[in-house]
Image (cartoon, helix red, strand yellow):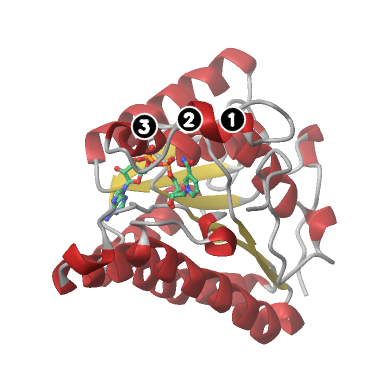
Amino acid sequence: MSAGPPHVNGLPLANRTAIVTGGASGIGLAIARRLASDGAAVAIFDIDGDAATAAASAIDAAAARTGAGTGPGTGPGAGGRARGYRVDVTDRDAIDGGVERTRDELGRPTILVNNAGLTLPGPFLDLSFEVWRRSMSLNLDSVFHCCQAVLPAMLEEGWGRIVNISSSSVHSGSPRLGAYVTAKSGVVGLTKVLALEFGPRGITVNTIPPGFIDTPMLRDAQKNGVMNVEQQTAKTPVGRIGQPQDVAAACAFLVREEAGYITGQIFGVNGGRNT
Ligand SMILES: NC(=O)c1ccc[n+]([C@@H]2O[C@H](COP(=O)([O-])OP(=O)(O)OC[C@H]3O[C@@H](n4cnc5c(N)ncnc54)[C@H](O)[C@@H]3O)[C@@H](O)[C@H]2O)c1
């Protein structure tokens, strides 16, 4: 097994290449930034190609300011660098194309964060089957496709880390989020299966179900009356809403070398509020 040298240049993810889906906004953007600052070369896959490119440029600019990603040894996979690709995670051909470009431009991807997702709310009796299927496609099938597309590179390396962003609503249920909660529940199940199948090959698979995190998605949910930020904050033991950086910190830990004995786990980031 080739584990790769941890902590090269003092950075825990140096010489690693990561793919973050939905990395142009909210939680995914915070994860992309954090993994890059930990030394990884980061490919941002997002349906909003312009936002993905802008996010990647900002990461590159930050790396240049701090000296990461420059100088000797900064070839593909050297870290601190980023690329943004327009990839719709419901489209397998687009995913395969994005993985190929990542390999060519940043190095073999061995970290995958499946983060892209949308709530698609609606009372159950009003939910069209089309919206139900769209939720499955975006929130669950995308994880199937991205894992299948990236696992071969991890198997070649004999090392890999997958983090699936699910949702705390899987544990509590949530009215008017039937299509979303069902799809995210599937993500938790697939996480457990993949952890068992790929643990022997050096690959860990975990899921982070975030609680209420202050992102454009959450603000939309507030606008649509699906949730109330103030009420949720009052029910949260640590007394505040989460920030995207809270999820990024947990994800950054799970993809490190030292987290190799943690797999198949549901790693809540919810301010102590489990329901
Ligand atoms: N914000 C929360 O409170 C919260 C809570 C639980 C779970 N989550 C989950 O966290 C993840 C990120 O959510 P967020 O709050 O940061 O949302 P966000 O809306 O800020 O970001 C989602 C990103 O996904 C991208 N995206 C949407 N459809 C896509 C597609 N088909 N292909 C590629 N990219 C696509 C969007 O362009 C956007 O950049 C989602 O999976 C969400 O379900 C969020």
Residue positioned 70% across, 72% down in the render: 264
Q: CA distance from mark 3 to mark 2?
A: 13 Å
The answer to which quarter of the image holds residue 202 is bottom right
Mark 2 lies on a secondary structure that is helix
State if disc 1 and disc 2 touch (CB < 8 Å): yes
Query: Label 2: which residue?
Result: 229
> Crowdedness of circle 2 by 10 Å Cα count: few (<14), some, many (20+)?
some
The kind of residue on which mark 3 rests is: Pro
Query: Label 1: which residue?
Result: 233
Residue positioned 61% across, 34% down in the render: 34
State if disc 2 and disc 3 touch (CB < 8 Å): no
- The disc, 3 or 2, on the residue closer to the chain's N-terminal end is 3
Q: Is mark 3 within 8 Å of ligand 1?
A: yes
The label nearer to you, 1 versus 3, is 1
| Residue 79 seen anywhere in this rendered image of the structure | no
Mark 3 lies on a secondary structure that is helix
Give x and y (percent) for residue 253.
Answer: 74, 47
Query: Label 3: which residue?
Result: 216
